[in-house]
Amino acid sequence: MSAPAQHHILAVNNDDAVLQLFTDLLSEEGYKVSTEKYLNKNLTQVIALVPDCIILDYMWADEDGGWSFLQMLRMEPKTANIPIILCTGAVREVQELEGQLKEMKVQVLLKPFDIDELLGLIRTALPDVEMAEASD
């Protein structure tokens, strides 16, 4: 079944094909989807979009730009509690950061990924959003 339309997913990846995959897949599941190839480091794009969940690529142009951006998201009060799914093929790097990622409440999805696994991670991340909306 499809997800409530109010759930907004932001996918950040420097690969247009991956962004198109996220758009097609998640839109079909009923999510509102925004995509960005790159985000500025002052977080204005994320704050303006107000996503319920972020799917973030770890590697940007062979740098760990996703890691520094992830840290910035967690330090900014307006984005600190947005669920994040780190989607990456950088297995070694993720293993090295496992403790920090767990502490930051970041879920990891390794590439190549199974679509059902991605959807499961999103559903796991979103109940907190649904509970917060229900208490308003």
Image (cartoon, rainbow, N blue to C red):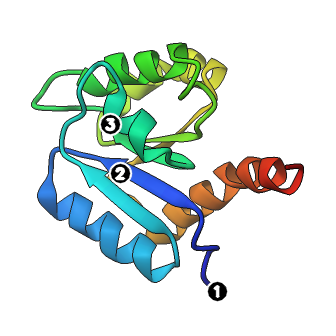
Relative image position of residue 22 (x, y in whole percent): 34, 65
Residue type, label 1: Met
Residue type, label 3: Gln
The residue located at (24%, 23%) in the rendering is 65
Give the vertical position of 134 relative to 107 (above or below). Answer: below
Relative image position of residue 128 (x, y in whole percent): 76, 47
Label 2 environment density (alpha carbons within 10 Å; few <14, some 14–19, many ≥20): many
Q: In the structure shown, which secondary structural element does the residue marked by tag 2 occupy?
A: strand
Q: Which residue is mark 1?
A: 1
The residue located at (44%, 82%) in the rendering is 28
- Say whether residue 100 is left or right of residue 54: right
The front one of 92 and 37 is: 37
Label 3 environment density (alpha carbons within 10 Å; few <14, some 14–19, many ≥20): few
In space, the residues marked 2 and 1 are separated at their CA atoms by 21 Å
**Going from the N terminus, do you reach mark 2 or mark 1 first?**
1
- Say whether residue 105 is left or right of residue 8: right
Relative image position of residue 91 (x, y in whole percent): 36, 34
In space, the residues marked 1 and 3 are separated at their CA atoms by 30 Å
Residue type, label 2: Ala
Q: Which mark is residue 45?
A: 3
- Callouts 2 and 1 close, C-beta under 8 Å: no
Instruction: Name the quarter where the N terminus is drawn.
Output: bottom right
Q: Quadrant of residue 119?
A: bottom right
- Say whether residue 36 is left or right of residue 124: left
Q: Which mark is residue 11?
A: 2
Q: Quadrant of residue 14?
A: top left
Judged by depth in the image, the label closer to the viewer, 1 or 3, is 3
The residue located at (62%, 74%) in the rendering is 3
Q: In the structure shown, which secondary structural element does the residue marked by tag 3 occupy?
A: helix
